[in-house]
Each structure stands twice: as structure tokens, then as C-alpha cells.
Image (spheres, rainbow, N blue to C red):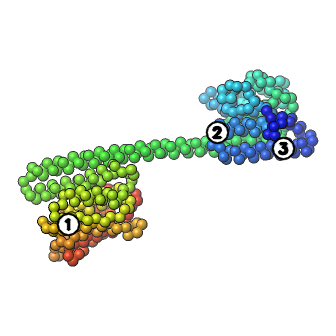
């Protein structure tokens, strides 16, 4: 190994030796600690962070050997997770016992740092075979932990006789503390990313389910509409035929909403102009031949829950206008939906036909259609208003635009 300037690393100064050498040595350690801090803020790769930490730590203590040993609780051993100076095959594979008879195990179990300046004469611990194999004569190791959780041990080893000092220990402990915080931050970030990934997967699954349910509802409603058509063909009473026609139209309108929802890219909202234009085409196809429908609809996004009652309301109003305003004569029904501001819409359905009957009172009307109009208007959050258009009739409803509604039909 060579130092950052390309020269071979100098031997660490003895504690209490030349003051200027000692000062330069400690300043360099501070610089290396700062470099690790900066690198830890920039990197999001835990393996790269550990490897760079061992490189800088070895430089800081003028040694060729440094390693991070990660504790494996399921094996009750350490694995050499990162390191410099070791023979090929050591990093990522070599195991060391985690009992208190080894220096690294003792430091991990007791949280006490260990300095062994004479491993050959050490009586407190056995010397791990890995150190013997590499001719290591002295070692210093400290615990790596973050937020109370122990990760492993940071260790610097040297095959050169000498002494690791208390000042070296302070440097190594500071390095380990910084490393512990960085690892903790990365683990939190990884947990957050995993949580977000699971949430995105759950939301995507929910979107698929919503589309599938909507598609099935649409198909089921289409079957109901078909059954009502069959009943209508078998009925001889004109009033019953009309009631079945009205019911089929209402069911078809709801099916149209679900069909549009199923085909939309966004299941929570729907483009009002696109959706209502499709619905109006459906209503126009069933209108008397000499009657027309004109539309002017604001291109705003509306909650899909809100689109259902609005579509049913529009269907009732336009169907009634076709039925009563002109009879079998010629005429036009006009539909406009205006955006009053960012939070309110105004629905207007008007014609130039016969107008309201004398003494008309919407609140006391007994017909199912009028009751539905009043109920749907209230459900949308507005107060239905019937006006004499002179000539003809005008219906007006102002209601709040909801981004995420919980309305039910």
C-alpha cells in the first residue's frame, strides 16, 4: 500500500514523541475522518461505503490491513464484509468466531475497544487463525453500532512491530461511530424504499382489481339491461313498456360509467368532457329522429364516484326533455356544464319546447323521474332549480367539484 501522495506509509509516531510529527499525524486522521463523512453522505451503496472506510482507516493508522467484520446472528460468527490488504478470498468469505475468547468477539459482546500490541504474547484472547496466516503482530478493534443496534467490528491490523495508542483508539472509534450512523441511515433508507416498493405494488394490484371489478360490474349491468329489454318485448301494457324502457336506460347509463372507468388510465378521476360526450352520443341515438342534442362541456377532471350520479341525472333530464318538450316535433336539447371556479360546476339542460306545466312544483312531483332528479341533485351537493326559459324549460344545478369523493349510488 502507498499513501495518498504515492509514498509508502510512515510508521505511526509513538505517543508522547515528536510533537510536530504527532500533530501532523492527528491532523491527517481528522482529514480522513472528514473524507469518510463526505463520502457517506454521497454514497447509497453499503458495500462501497464499507470498503472505502477500510481503505481510509488503514491510511489513518499507517497500516496495510483493515477489515469490517459483520456479525451474523444466525451463525454466531463474523464474516469479513470489507477489507484491504488481505489475500484473495478473504473478504466476503472468511469467518471468525464471535465468542469472548477472540478480540473481535470480546469487543462486540462487551462494547469495549481492544488494543493488542503483542498478539504473540497475548494471554487475554486467542489469536484468530486469519491473523496468524497473515503474520499480524498487533491489532486494534472497536464496535460499530448505530441507534443501539450492533452491526459488527472495525479492526486495523499490522504485521509491523509497534504500538497502537489511545489516540489511535480515539481515531478508530470516531471512524466506527461515523460508520455506524451512515449504515443506520442507509438501512433506514433501504427500509423506506422497500416499503414504498411494496406500497406501489399494492396500489398497482388495487388498480388492477378496481378495473376488473368495474369491468365485471359493467358486464353484469349489460346483462340486466338485456333482461329488461326482453321483459319489455313481452309486455303488452304501454305504461309497463315505458317503465321498462326507462329502467333499461338507467341501467345502461350506469354500465356506461363503468365501461368508461374500465378503459381509463386513471381509475380515480375521469375527463368530464370525454365521458359526457360519449354518454350524450348514447342518449342521442335513442332520441326521436327529428330531435337533436347539443353539448358544451368543460374539460375538467371529475371523481369517478361523482360521475355516476351526474351521468344518471343528465340521462333523466335529457330523456325527459326529448319526451315532453317537443313531443314528436322538431327541436334541440342543450346541455352545458361550466366550470364556475376551481371547485364548482354548473349543469344546465334547456330546451325551447312546451315549457313547464301550470302550477309545476318539483318538490311535490310524484313521478319516479322527478324524484330521481331531486335525489341525484342533492347527492351531488347542489339544489336543483327549474326555470321558465320563455319559451321552453331550463334546469340548473350548481354543485361542488370533488377530487376524491365517497358518493355512492
Above/below status of 325 relative to 40: below
Q: Quadrant of the N terminus?
A: top right
At horizontal 27% and vertical 71% (from top left) the residue drawn is: 385
Rendering coords of residue 312 (x, y %) = 26, 59
Q: Which mark is residue 86?
A: none
1 vs 3, front mark:
1
Above/below status of 266 relative to 175: below
At horizontal 43% and vertical 45% (from top left) the residue drawn is: 204
Q: Would you say 5 lies left or right of 194 here?
A: right
Label whose residue precedes the other's in the sequence (1 or 2) = 2
Q: Residues within 10 Å of mark 2 (few under 14, many from 20)?
A: few
1 vs 2, front mark:
1
Question: Which SS class for mark 1?
Answer: helix
Image quadrant of residue 123?
top right
Instruction: Return the residue at label 2.
Output: 46
Rendering coords of residue 61 (x, y %) = 81, 37
Above/below status of 71 relative to 339: above
Question: Which SS class for mark 2?
Answer: helix
What is the CA distance from the residue labelled 1 to the residue labelled 3?
91 Å
Q: Would you say 91 lies left or right of 271 here?
A: right
Rendering coords of residue 16 (x, y %) = 91, 41
What is the CA distance from the residue labelled 1 to the residue labelled 2?
70 Å
Label whose residue precedes the other's in the sequence (2 or 3) = 3
Instruction: Return the residue at label 3.
Output: 26
Q: Would you say 259 lies left or right of 330 here?
A: right
How many numbered callouts? 3
Q: Residues within 10 Å of mark 3 (few under 14, many from 20)?
A: some
Amino acid at each position: 500500500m502507498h499513501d495518498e501522495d504515492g509514498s509508502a506509509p510512515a510508521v505511526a509516531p509513538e505517543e508522547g514523541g515528536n510533537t510536530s510529527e504527532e500533530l501532523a499525524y492527528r491532523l491527517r486522521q481528522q482529514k480522513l475522518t472528514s473524507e469518510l463523512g463526505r463520502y457517506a453522505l454521497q454514497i447509497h451503496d453499503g458495500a462501497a461505503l464499507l470498503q472505502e472506510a477500510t481503505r481510509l482507516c488503514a491510511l489513518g493508522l499507517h497500516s496495510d490491513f483493515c477489515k469490517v467484520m459483520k456479525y451474523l446472528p444466525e451463525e454466531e460468527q463474523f464474516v469479513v464484509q470489507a477489507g484491504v490488504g488481505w489475500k484473495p478470498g478473504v473478504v466476503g468469505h472468511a469467518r471468525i468466531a464471535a465468542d469472548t475468547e477472540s478480540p473481535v468477539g470480546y469487543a462486540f459482546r462487551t462494547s469495549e475497544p481492544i488494543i493488542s500490541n503483542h498478539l504473540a504474547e497475548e494471554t487475554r484472547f486467542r489469536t484468530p487463525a486469519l491473523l496468524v496466516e497473515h503474520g499480524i503482530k498487533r491489532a486494534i478493534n472497536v464496535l460499530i453500532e448505530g441507534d443501539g443496534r450492533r452491526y459488527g467490528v472495525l479492526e486495523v491490523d499490522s504485521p509491523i512491530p509497534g504500538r497502537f495508542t489511545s489516540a489511535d483508539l480515539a481515531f478508530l472509534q470516531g471512524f466506527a461511530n461515523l460508520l455506524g450512523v451512515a449504515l443506520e441511515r442507509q438501512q433506514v433508507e433501504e427500509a423506506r424504499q422497500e416499503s414504498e416498493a411494496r406500497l406501489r405494488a399494492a396500489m398497482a394490484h388495487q388498480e388492477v382489481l378496481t378495473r376488473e371489478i368495474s369491468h365485471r360490474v359493467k358486464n353484469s349491468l349489460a346483462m340486466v339491461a338485456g333482461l329488461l329489454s326482453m321483459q319489455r318485448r313481452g309486455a303488452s301494457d304501454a305504461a309497463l313498456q315505458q317503465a321498462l324502457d326507462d329502467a333499461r336506460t338507467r341501467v345502461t347509463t350506469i354500465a356506461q360509467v363503468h365501461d368508461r372507468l374500465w378503459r381509463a388510465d386513471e381509475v380515480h378521476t375521469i375527463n368530464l368532457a370525454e365521458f359526457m360526450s360519449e354518454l350524450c352520443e348514447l342518449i342521442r341515438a335513442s332520441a326521436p329522429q327529428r330531435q337533436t342534442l347539443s353539448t358544451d362541456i368543460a374539460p375538467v377532471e371529475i371523481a369517478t364516484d361523482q360521475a355516476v350520479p351526474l351521468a344518471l341525472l343528465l340521462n333523466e333530464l335529457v330523456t325527459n326533455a326529448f319526451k315532453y318538450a317537443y313531443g314528436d316535433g322538431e327541436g334541440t336539447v342543450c346541455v352545458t356544464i361550466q366550470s364556475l371556479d376551481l371547485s364548482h360546476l354548473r349543469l344546465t339542460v334547456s330546451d325551447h319546447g312546451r315549457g313547464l306545466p301550470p302550477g309545476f312544483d318539483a318538490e311535490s312531483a310524484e313521478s319516479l323521474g322527478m324524484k330521481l332528479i331531486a335525489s341525484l341533485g342533492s347527492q351531488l351537493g347542489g339544489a336543483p332549480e327549474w326555470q321558465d326559459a320563455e319559451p321552453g324549460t331550463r334546469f340548473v344545478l350548481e354543485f361542488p367539484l370533488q377530487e376524491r369523493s365517497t358518493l355512492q349510488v
